[in-house]
Amino acid sequence: MGSISLSEKRLVITGGARGLGRAFVEAAIKAGARVVVADILEDVGRQTVKKLSRLGEVYFESVDLGDPGSIAALSERSINQLGGVDGLVNCAAIATGIGGKTADEIDVETWDRVMTVNVRGTWLAVRAFSPALRAAGNGKIVNIASDTAMWGAPRLLHYVASKGAVISMTRALARELGNDGIAVNAIAPGLTLVEATEYVPKERHRQYVDGRAMNREQQPEDVTGTVLYLLSDAADFVTGQLLPVNGGFIFN
């Protein structure tokens, strides 16, 4: 199969400053897309945009997914910057440094913060960008879930619950937005070697490697092709789907 083209596609990728989000940004630019990198990490985000600007058209916009006003402002600025939006990748989430506690040990404040950003933030981003995606005619939304929600990873209940909610929202949104020509899908990456997973114990990394049909560590580049496909015209009739991308740790 030839390379996927996103020529002239106008994309917004939240959490695009580093990690998986950055990998999605770079791959999308190389595929011909014009991209807004949206992230709360302003310095890192601007450095990322500076480095990737040699590849194509890319902009940085600050956003706090815990703040509804910030999300609405992101939508307005992105549409002005790009002249419209064809695709939204909801990658931003709280993941770093929250694992290791049992369901009895997680504090309410952390639970609420994870749900506010990972669940409510994803919904509000979809709501904010839906008018532009309707106007695009065949808009695409790709929500980044996690395979932890498929196998029930222990000592990570708030994160697992939030990603389970993202999967459920994806299916409901696909029903609601389908007649507007908007396709909504989710991917569930496995444990990937990025900054956000540096805190994960070595035994959990080994559990993933040993349990995969393909026994190796997962790299960001293992996930980008699936995201590009779901953003492309080739996926116009694919919606409401969850695609695990984890080397066969979980079969769907």
Image: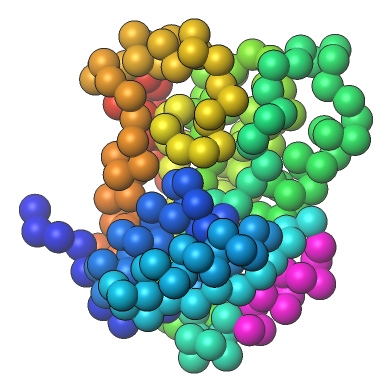
**Residue 89 counted in the magenta span:** no
Q: Is residue 1 left or right of residue 110?
A: left
Tell me which residue sits at (43%, 76%) in the image. Answer: 58
**Residue 75 counted in the magenta span:** yes
Tell me which residue sits at (31%, 82%) in the image. Answer: 8
Outermost residue to the left: 1
* Residue interval drawn in magenta: 67-77
Q: Position of residue 18 (x, y in %)?
A: 50, 52
Question: Of residues 201 and 67, which is closer to you in this image?
Answer: 201
State the quadrant of the C terminus.
top left
Residue 55 drawn above or below residue 229: below
Tell me which residue sits at (85%, 39%) in the image. Answer: 112
Q: Is residue 186 left or right of residue 120?
A: left
Question: Of residues 230 and 56, which is closer to you in this image?
Answer: 56
Tell me which residue sits at (60%, 52%) in the image. Answer: 92
Quadrant for residue 131, please give it.
bottom right
